[in-house]
Image (cartoon, rainbow, N blue to C red):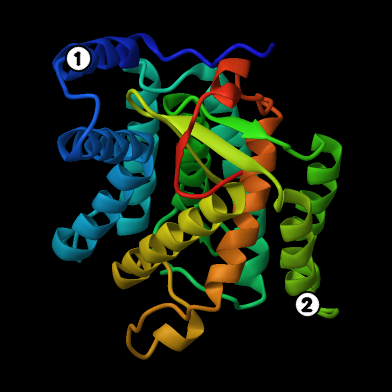
Amino acid sequence: MIARPALTSVEARIDAFANRLLRSARRSGARARLVEFAVFVLKQAWACVFGATFLAVVVAAKLWYPDDAVLARNDALTIAAVVIQVVMVLGRLETLRELRVVVLFHIVGTVMELFKTDVGSWMYAADGVLRIGGVPLYSGFMYAAVGSYMVRVYRLFDLRFSRYPRRWLTAIVAVAIYANFFTHHWIVDLRWVLVVAVIVLWGRTTMRFRFFRGTFRMPLLLAFAGVAVFIWLAENIATYAGAWLYPSQVGGWHPVDASKLSSWFLLMIVSVVLVTWVYPPREPDPIELSAVDKGIAAP
């Protein structure tokens, strides 16, 4: 059996303190459901701490960073992202094992950014020296934020999966998705073919997760779609704050087209596959399978 990824020492203390506070909570009724929901929201916020903190810095820079500052705004954002990452590791909010995944996301994202900006898919402000070509180095941290969330949510919610597809098959689909982000500029865009492949491959997979007393379940595809929506909402905030712009936003900001949801959905698959090679998917314990689960959908 694959062991549950351990909490960091800081997280373990926070978890123990929270459990002491919650131990007297009722086990049934409306108040119990409210407590479970509150714990769910707080753990999601904790899983998003890197991305949420960096997004807050981006918005703050948009509102208050002086135009005549000696340090370019893009360079300040890059330094802020590095500081956030260092604090998370030194503060034991993130494990070194997870940091390797985050760095891999950073590399994968930066390569895509270099290509996409070169073909004009989106653009960054031209200030600063901490950049590669037209891509400021903080751009890779935005992909790293997705990676940070994925690895943290995996252990914070003790995720388990029923009927998870073979990892070598998921790797093939993930490579095809990543390649399509590049090749669709020259050949036919296969994103909808790839969406169908994802539905076929993960369509029977059920995710079980725990955030206080209850074990809940939901279709994994629904979880993918939900996270893609939240990333799209964050993208709207980031483009409004000028982190980057699409060509149609240069003349004036407007919400990112909803068609980008398909791109974020597919990027989610690449993210999930990368994480599963560090934290292999775990089957539910037999006791969980025999119990009557709480759930929003049957497996």
Q: Position of residue 279 (x, y in %)?
A: 63, 25
Q: Nearer the viewer, residue 188 or 45?
A: 45
| Disc 2 packing (10 Å; few <14; some 14–19; many ≥20) | some
Q: Nearer the viewer, residue 219 or 61?
A: 219
Q: Is residue 232 left or right of residue 59?
A: right
Examine the rendered structure and indicate whether residue 172 appears above or below residue 188. above
| Residue type, mark 1 in image | Arg
Name the mark on residue 1: none
Q: Is residue 32 left or right of residue 207?
A: left
Q: Nearer the viewer, residue 52 or 80?
A: 52
> Considering the image in quadrants, where does the C terminus appear?
top right
Examine the rendered structure and indicate whether residue 112 appears above or below residue 257. above
Q: Position of residue 298 (x, y in %)?
A: 56, 46
Q: Is residue 42 left or right of residue 218?
A: left
Mark 2 and mark 1 lie on one chain; the one further toward the N terminus is 1
Write the residue at 38% across / 28% down: 214
Residue 131 visible within the image:
no
In the picture of the structure, the residue carrying the numbered disc 1 is 23
Residue 241 visible within the image:
yes
| Disc 1 packing (10 Å; few <14; some 14–19; many ≥20) | few
| Residue type, mark 2 in image | Asp
In the picture of the structure, the residue carrying the numbered disc 2 is 189
> Considering the image in quadrants, where does the N terminus appear?
top right
Q: Position of residue 221 (x, y in %)?
A: 60, 54
Write the residue at 26% across / 10% down: 16
Examine the rendered structure and indicate whether residue 33 appears above or below residue 277. below
User: Dot 2: what SS?
Assistant: loop
User: Dot 1: what SS?
Assistant: loop
Are dots 2 and 1 in contact, CB under 8 Å? no
